[in-house]
Amino acid sequence: MKPISIMLSALVIGMVSSAVMADGVSLTNATSLPNVSPANSDLANRGAYIARAADCMACHREDYSGGVPIETPIGNIYSTNITPSERYGIGNYTEADLQKTLRKGRAPGHQIYPAMPYPSYHGMTDEDISALFAYFQTVPPVEAPPEKTTHLPFPLNIRTLMLAWNVINVPSTENRTGLTQTQQRGEYLVNNLEHCGTCHTPRNLTQGLDKDMYLSGAPLGKWYAPNITPDNESGIGRWSEQDIVTYLRTGMLDKRAYAGGPMAEAVAHSTRYLTDEDLSAMAAYLKVVPIIQTDDKMIPVDVSRLPRPLSSSITYNLLEQKDYLAQAKTSVLSNSNPDNSNSPKSLYLSTCGSCHGVDGYAQPDARYASIVGLSSIRRDKPDALINVIAYGAKGALNTAPKMPGFSKELSHAQIASITNYVRVNFGGHSRSDVSATDVKRILK
Ligand code: HEC
Ligand code: HEC
Ligand code: HEC
């Protein structure tokens, strides 16, 4: 394919996905798969669904051309071109090659790094791998190498070292006994296809998944993937199965949770495309995984402590919202205290109010996140909120202008001040005493 036609096909893929994203917002049923075609065999179309459920695009790009950096403690590892190009991609793979790569990390001629989640894909069924194999034959080949490739220093560049690692860390999960058929399907989806644990399970000393701490939460660069075991205080024990389905379908759960950052990617590329049946199976399974309580506790949603929307229309009316914000700012500043421009409320209004609204309910129609009652704000630890304020949120799910980070504009004291204001006023905490020193420590 010539560069120009590659650009064109990239454009088309881009258009298709943003169109899907725009109507993906209010959807309650699975969106139709953009990469399914009646011209392809049933097997290939089933493979398109498996590719979504296994979230291959999140790392290999929408056109599977690769070059996405996966941050690891040993350095960036770049994903590869997995289009059927014989020269740059996997055009020469047999089905057996694909099986070995997905299950054991053994690509033809070289061992791959576990930045590719083969420790999870290890449990993929033969049928699903056949379907993936058929599907990848239908993907348009990209005749170019990825923009960036992996260069690790010696001895990390010795790929066969991974063989020893695999003995300890593959497979990354164990199958439970005594599950219903639905829960079993959920277990397969959560563990083997969706590989939720690669983000939500902490790592052991060798950087494999710590099975004893399964799904109990783990740091992820500037984000934290929270505890999703059914613990009431620190996990999602208070969520109903329907809540889990809604969140995985839309990335939002009113007054409860919002997927920004890496979780937004998982929803945008993968979970929102799953059938209701599969999402329900995952929810059913997540309700029965072993409960692990962590110290990342949160206060329950207490509606009586949360703000009421300022007016019934304001949340949906941008102009009214703008006037209201101007008035609120004036009234804070006209208060006689000379320090008021640096008061918590004034800082919130001038830094966050234009997008999240005076009352925190924002503009849901325009996909500015309502931040009232979010779990990131209700936790005892302010870390997640402070990181969002400092570094912003740029999830692929959202077509609204992205949230910028304020680490350069705001001092540690100002970030602490806004954090306390947001936690008390929109999170329902009775008090919040985050200091500038706390912010400095957390952002370090
Ligand atoms: C979390 C990120 C991630 C996901 C999800 C992911 N991959 Fe990968 N994949 C990678 C990375 C990184 C590499 C390169 C690893 C290396 O260089 O050692 C890779 C390598 C590969 C290779 C080996 C290519 C070669 O010959 O070198 C194949 C095949 C592959 N991926 C297929 C898939 C398929 C199919 C899916 C979905 C079922 C998938 N990947 C999902 C990150 C990912
Ligand atoms: C690429 C990493 C990544 C993957 C993969 C991932 N998550 Fe997440 N998840 C996160 C992060 C980070 C958050 C925090 C989101 C935020 O605050 O914006 C999160 C949040 C959540 C929450 C909300 C919890 C709360 O208390 O607010 C649930 C539920 C969840 N994830 C479930 C899942 C499930 C189920 C899967 C597998 C389908 C999954 N996640 C896959 C990173 C990930
Ligand atoms: C330019 C508009 C804009 C400004 C200014 C802004 N935000 Fe945001 N914020 C967003 C958008 C858009 C999202 C949703 C991002 C996404 O979907 O990826 C968001 C998401 C959030 C979230 C949810 C993230 C999560 O994953 O839990 C919180 C909390 C938040 N903002 C707090 C703040 C605070 C506090 C300020 C002021 C310091 C602020 N925002 C300033 C636009 C903005």
Image (spheres, rainbow, N blue to C red):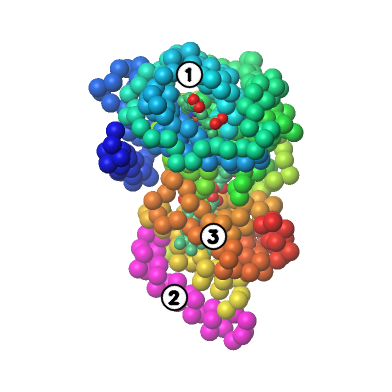
Q: Position of residue 112 (x, y in %)?
A: 57, 26
Which label sits on residue 326? 2
Q: Amino acid at mark 1?
A: Leu
In the displayed structure image, the side of residue 403 where residue 230 appears, left or right: right
Q: Amino acid at mark 2?
A: Ala
Q: Position of residue 373 (x, y in %)?
A: 56, 53
Q: Is residue 299 above or below residue 150?
A: below
Residue 47 appears anywhere in the view: no
Q: How many marks?
A: 3
Q: Is residue 211 above or below residue 344?
A: above
Q: Is residue 222 above or below residue 136?
A: below
User: In which image quadrant can residue 66 be found?
Assistant: top left
- The answer for how far apart the CA atoms under marks 3 and 1 are is 40 Å
CB of mark 2 within 8 Å of CB of mark 3? Answer: no
Q: Which residues are magenta?
A: 312-340
Is 160 within the magenta?
A: no
Q: Position of residue 145 (x, y in %)?
A: 42, 35
Name the residue: 40% across, 70% down.
Answer: 322
Task: Specify the quarter for ligand 2.
Answer: top right
Name the residue: 30% across, 40% down.
Answer: 3
- Asked if the residue at label 1 sits under 8 Å from ligand 1, the reply is yes
Q: Is residue 333 above or below residue 126?
A: below
Q: Which residue is mark 1?
A: 98
In the displayed structure image, the side of residue 37 where residue 24 appears, left or right: right
Residue 56 appears anywhere in the view: yes
Name the residue: 30% across, 17% down.
Answer: 41
Q: Which residue is mark 3?
A: 405
> Which badge, 2 or 3, is on the more N-terminal residue?
2
In the displayed structure image, the side of residue 99 where residue 233 appears, left or right: right
Is 338 within the magenta?
A: yes
